[in-house]
Structures are given as C-alpha cells and as structure tokens.
Image: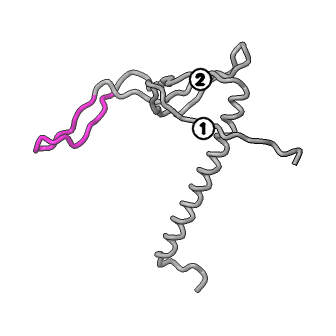
Amino acid sequence: MADEKKTVLVPVRYTKAEDYKVIYVNGIYGGTTGKGEIRFDLFQEFTHSPEDENLVIDEMGTIVGHEALESDKQIEMTRERMVGIVMTLGTARAFQGWFAEHLQRFEERLAERERMLFSEEGEDSDEPTGNE
C-alpha cells in the first residue's frame, strides 16, 4: 500500500466565448514561428461565382435554370483564411493524439455503415451468390 497514489477529481466546466462560431474549412497552411511554436491558418478554398448570367424562364414566368455568360477572365481559386492558430509543440502533439483517436473511430463507424449497407443490398438482390 506504500505505492498507492491518491487521486483527486477536478470538475471541468466547458463554456463558449461570446464570439464562438462553427466554421467550415477545407484546407490548412502554415509552419513554425521564430519562437519554435506551430502556426497555421485554416482556410476555405473556392472559385468565384460568374459576374453575369442569363436566367432561363419558361412560358409561365418561372425560372427553370441559368447559364453563366462567357468571360475573358481566367478561372481562379480563392483561399479565404478563416482563422489563424498558434500552439506549442506539446499542444500540437495533444491535438495529433486527439485527431488520430477520433479519425480512427470515424473510420470504424464508416466501415460498419458500409458493411451494413452492402449486406442489406445483398439480402434483396436477385443476383446469384454462388452458394446455391
């Protein structure tokens, strides 16, 4: 019993900052700072809407489609930086562990859904299974 360690439960309350928001990102760009921290921006990558378009309207006056007008401009991609993040190496390693764990769970759930989907399709199929 001499090696028995005493533990204490510490309650943790999660709150949201007043300016908290959920954002969509589909890219990341960054590197290290001069102080040895990790800095990166999360961004959204997209193309722009056309400057002009024609609406296709049927005889009842209902919009049934649209056609972008030709433009001399080259199509360009925009990467709109949504948020910049700076963290220590220790925090980055904690993030890495958290992401790895959650990605594994997500991939397992996805694989299970696919197995269920394909097994349901096989039950209703009229195709021979080779076990007849």
Which of pointers 1 and 2 lies earlier in the amino acid sequence?
A: 1
Residue 52 lies in the magenta-colored region: no
Q: Which residue is mark 2?
A: 85
Looking at the rendered structure, the kind of residue marked 2 is Ile
Q: Per the image, is 55 magenta?
A: yes
Secondary structure under the numbered disc 2 in the rendered image = strand
Marks 1 and 2, Cα distance to the nearest angstrom?
Answer: 27 Å
Residue tagged 1: 11
Marks 1 and 2: which is nearer the front?
1
Q: Position of residue 6 (x, y in %)?
A: 77, 42
Residue 64 higher or lower than 25, as above or below: below
| Amino acid at the residue labelled 1 | Pro
Task: Name the spot of residue 85 as percent of width and height, x first.
Answer: 59, 23
The kind of secondary structure element at disc 1 is loop
Q: Residue 96 placed where, x, y %?
A: 68, 36
Where does the magenta region start and end? Answer: 53-70
Which residue in the rendered view is the most extreme toward the bottom?
132
